[in-house]
Amino acid sequence: MSEGKQPLQEQAQAKAGILELGQVVTGKEGAIQTLVIAGQIEGHSTLPEGVKATRYEHILPSLVMAEESDEIGGVLLLINTMGGDVEAGLCMAELIAGMKKPTAALVLGGGHSIGIPLAVSAKRTFIAESATMTVHPVRINGLVLGVPQSFEYLRKMQERILRFITDHSHILPEKLEEWMQGRHDMATDIGTVVHAREAVSAGLVDEVGTLSSAIAWLKEEIKAKKAP
């Protein structure tokens, strides 16, 4: 292949990645892979047509590829999600948390519900000044049996989420529980809408920042990792 055609092919591949999966790789040495987590987190059931969704079976292979690639130095997660399937969200969050390469998350708009574990799973979490994060108890849809086992299942699932968040951030469990049981912010539910600076002061998020903040941090980490 001629040198002139190579850049055109790379541009076409980048465009296809953006259009199909919302993913792009930028830079040459120590490239950064950007993954978009937007809309609702889709789990084992397909969401209705017209619902913006992030499918975990798209994100997981991309994370493995980034971890194994010699060209990719770090991963940037752009998060604007209303939440969604708990197990699918935790599945992605655990994979991100287990990566050795530098990972940064930037919450834009909102990182609600199961989007919170996804945000804190990165090694450094940024939140835009105008963004919010909604903390609330676990909720399930569909048929629920009114038996002790159902409530025990919900309790254990909620403990899993709380443990993951506190293990991957600096927030106190008591504060997170307080937000989860809040009764003032949500008209038809319990929980708390947490604004950017409040999330930082409580230790849920590392800092208020922008795209340039997240990229600058990633580049410094990639550079430090390459240093002898």
Image (cartoon, rainbow, N blue to C red):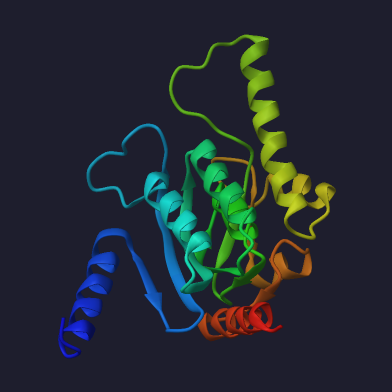
Q: In which quarter of the image is residue 133?
A: bottom right
Residue drawn at x 27%, y 39% is 48
Q: Where is residue 13 in the image (x, y as percent from the top left)?
A: 24, 71
Q: In which quarter of the image is residue 227?
A: bottom right
Q: Nearer the viewer, residue 24 or 105?
A: 24
Residue drawn at x 40%, y 32% is 44
Whether 41 is drawn above or below 79: the answer is above
Q: Which quadrant would the C terminus be assigned to in this image?
A: bottom right
Q: Nearer the viewer, residue 207 or 214?
A: 214
Give left or right: position of 212 versus 159.
left
Give left or right: position of 57 versus 210.
left
Report how many numbered discs are placed on residues in the image. Answer: 0
Q: Which quadrant would the N terminus be assigned to in this image?
A: bottom left
Whether 75 is drawn above or below 120: the answer is below
Q: Where is residue 83 in the image (x, y as percent from the top left)?
A: 49, 48
- In this orientation, does residue 180 appear? yes
Residue drawn at x 56%, y 75% is 128
Q: Residue farthest to the bottom?
A: 4
Q: Which of 123 and 74 is in front in this view?
A: 74
Residue drawn at x 59%, y 78% is 218
Q: Where is residue 168 in the image (x, y as percent from the top left)?
A: 72, 55
Give left or right: position of 74 versus 59.
right
Q: Where is residue 148 in the image (x, y as percent from the top left)?
A: 68, 11
Q: Residue farthest to the front?
A: 1
Q: Which of 154 and 33 is in front in this view?
A: 33
Q: Residue farthest to the top?
A: 147
